[in-house]
Amino acid sequence: MAVVIAASGAHAQTRTEEIERARREKEASVQPERVSSFENVMLQFKNRKIMERVTAGYNGLRAQIGSMATGSGFAAGPDFLREDLADGRIRISGSAAISTNLWQKYQAGIVLPRLGAGRFSLGFDAARRDYRSLEFYGMGIDSSRRNRSDYRLEDTSVDATAAFWVARHVRVGGSFGGLWTDIRRGNDSELPGTETLFDDSSAPGLFSQANFLRPGLFGQVDYRDDPAGPKSGGSYVAQYTLYDDRSLGQFGFHRWDVDVQQYIPFFNRSRRIALRARMTMTDAKAGQRVPFFLQPSVGGSDDLRGFRPYRFTGPNAVVYNAEYRWEIFSGLDGALFVDAGKVMSRAGHLAFSDMEVSPGFGFRFNARNRTFMRVDVGFSHEGTAVWLKFNDPFTPLLFGAATRQPQY
Amino acid sequence: MKRLAGILMITLACAADGLCQKFYEDDPLIREPIPLHVTNAASRKLSDYYDILSHTLATPGEKHTKGVLIPAQGVNTLGDPMEGAWWERRHYWRRMSAEELQRGPGNERPPATDGPWTVVSAKTEGITPGFVILDRYNRRYFIKFDPPSNPEMATGADQIASKIFYALGYHVPENYIAYFTPEMLKLGEDVTVEDRLGRKHKMTGRHLTEILSRVHRGDDGRYRVTASLALPGKTIGPYRYYGTRRDDPNDTVPHEHRRDLRAMHLACALVNHDDSRSINSTDVLEDGPSGKYIKHYQLDFGSTLGSASDKINSPRSGGEYLFDWKKAVVQLVTLGFAVQPWARAHYPDIKAVGRFESEKFDPDNWVPEYPNPAFLNRLPDDEFWMAKQIVNLRDEDISAIVETAEYSDPLAAEWITRCLIERRDKIGRSVFVKVLPLDRFKVNSGFLEWVDLPVLYGLGEPLEIRIRWAEFDNKREVSRGIAGATSAQLPTMKEGGYAVATLESPRRPRQTIRVYLRKRAGNEEVIGVERTW
């Protein structure tokens, strides 16, 4: 009965009363709005720009992961980058990285990116590398897997690069620098040293290394829609570099690099075909030879993905890659690919004959249209290779190539 | 058991005393009662990261369960939300002229261009650069730009979508298209600017130059912007699409059950407002008749009509969530060969138009960027309530609204207008088959009249409608059929009595409409409408 009385007394006579009663009941228990602890953490994460600060580091100093040659193991180290100096007219970078296999890489650079009303740029780079166990299988496409060996490369390079935007999508430039190289016994105890399987005739430069001056010219047509995560357009790079042996007079050579990429989107860019052809040719100067460690190689995470890194080495190399990429959801792309490549003793043998072929599949993890991580699985007659990388597989050739010569 | 007994006693008492009833004297309530004074509402921000994460992984809010649907709340007995803090009756209830549609929430306070614009805050980083200015009358505006790649796109979209939302009844700010030259800008005193790392710096001319270098500048040297007039009152952060504000005594209906929010799905679908999430709303503490109350606004329409504010929107926008387990698995398994409809859409090569089209548009399957609890709870009667408003935007209404975008390219206006018209019609056709599409019930000369909306708007053939009349006992909530009463003519009703007409169509046996009438002061009036499907 008490319940009935209470109900009668509280019952509304109008809709207005009913609504007002609900309001008054809530008014009696209003509390400050608040967000959960977890949401607050996420809010502060964004408001305090934690990710940006971690990425940018302290006054440009931050941690860097990766960025070393395949085979190094997990690499990390401090990285310094300031792009805001002199209102963005000066960009300074520097890094030091060491890997779990104790490989080391040091780099410093300064770039003036906006000279001449933004049409001209000038950059200086210096790099020091100690790659303790690079693999070498011998020369040629017929090199045997059983001849897997390792050597240690230490080199230092200094280069200056100037580039000029001829048109919106076209730039040309030149570079000039020096390269000091040293080859030693490899550090992988499970592999025989290259010097135990090869000699100076089968691995030129194995026992004596030269110092080089290297002037170069390059040009690029780049009309990719977004160079950091292209979905359409193309990039065509050609580069010539003269390696002038200044110390021994035995290893001077010419090198030509071509990197052609084309992206063909369809179904509203949710799918695309990505094509790349990369070719490197070398030509020793009269009476001289091309050091084996400066000859191009194929195999590894960025070209022939079903083969081990540096599986094939030769004076000339060509790699063709075709990828079908599709969006699984907005942060993940799937990829099916076929890689084909070879090394050859003579330039001009670019046909598809005698190619090593490696099909595979992969996943691209994207944020803001950039691939920040990928997993690729490549297959070949030599086995299956799984790659976890923090780059786009088609990262194009860098101008001047100071820190990517040889292209590891 | 004790509780059950209590409920039973209350029910019996209600029946005996007439305390329980379906309709009250003041039904249908057109306007919410005067809101209570809000004493202590504090500003708080919400995390958009959390919003995406929580809504994607486990959409919050109360949901329908199998076999138990939760009808929309916050509505009157006619099924309309009550006017007030969330929504107002506009174009559908009182046809707005072209001038009114173009005026929207106001057109008399654009930023003055015959004086300096004093910049009082800015952001140089982020997706969309912008700043806040005071004009010569000390009015505060939020300034937003077009991306360099797509002149007029974001600013045009903002005008059109905000005006459409206004016509559909929502509260929106006064947004103007304005033009300025860099010489008009003047830095305020002690203005700070936040860099990309969140560090505050004293703002200088360099910062302004940096902002202006990243946005579109017209051939005449002027910048075209959206100038959004600051809302009156104190902004206290966004609302959520679920739950209620704990500090607002007037906010008693869980947002996921508000008809105006559930049905907003279709309004967003119309203009492809896939960014319709909490952070694009705001609550404002405004002066009301009894003190302060919280009013709820929709904001930031720059990411509509295929625009993503700083670029054209992704083609998947509106077609798919950013992440959807099922669809991701389908794409994974089929290697992308299961081509989604949005992937086959065609877009015009018009810079001022983002990825906006109508051919592949499917209102039933349109989605925002991630699940929205209110949108997910929408029912056919929620959709009908919005669809009837949308189809009431006639071709000339849409043209008038598109004019406010001030597109310099007539093709842009033409494309947007055509797409909006076609999307409007698709919405009508889609929704009007889910419930009996009859509305505007009224009594005229002793007959019940209504409008068959598809017929009125050219979206369908007339339905054969059959009527059954019954007396309705409002206190006991039971009805008793009246033999032979099967026409639109009202049965005889006594003063203070109720009747209910059940409208059915043989072609749609599951769909009915119950129209309730009451006789008061000698006149019969429609006081309630219920739909089933």
Image: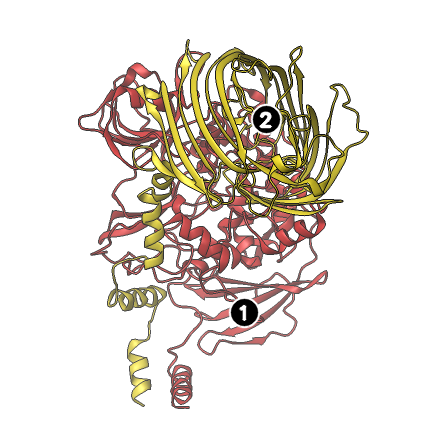
- Judging by colour alone, the chain drawn in yellow in this rendered image is A
Are there few (<14), some (14-19), or many (20+) residues within 10 Å of tag 1? few
- At numbered mark 1, what does the secondary structure look like: helix, strand or loop? loop
Residue at the spot of label 1? B65
x and y percent of residue A93 in the render? 38, 27
| Cα separation between marks 1 and 2 | 44 Å
Residue at the spot of label 2? B414
Asked if the residue under mark 2 is in contact with the one under mark 1, i.e. CB atoms within 8 Å, the reply is: no
Please name the amino acid that badge 2 sits on. Answer: Glu
* In this picture, residue A94 sits left or right of residue B204: right
Asked if B331 appears above or below A2 in the picture, the reply is above
- At numbered mark 2, what does the secondary structure look like: helix, strand or loop? helix
| Quadrant housing residue A63 | top left
In percent of the image, x 73 and y 19: which residue is there? A347
* In this picture, residue A8 sits left or right of residue A396: left
x and y percent of residue B349 in the render? 61, 24
Asked if B161 appears above or below A278 in the picture, the reply is below
**Which of the chains bears the disc numbered 2?**
B
- Judging by colour alone, the chain drawn in red in this rendered image is B
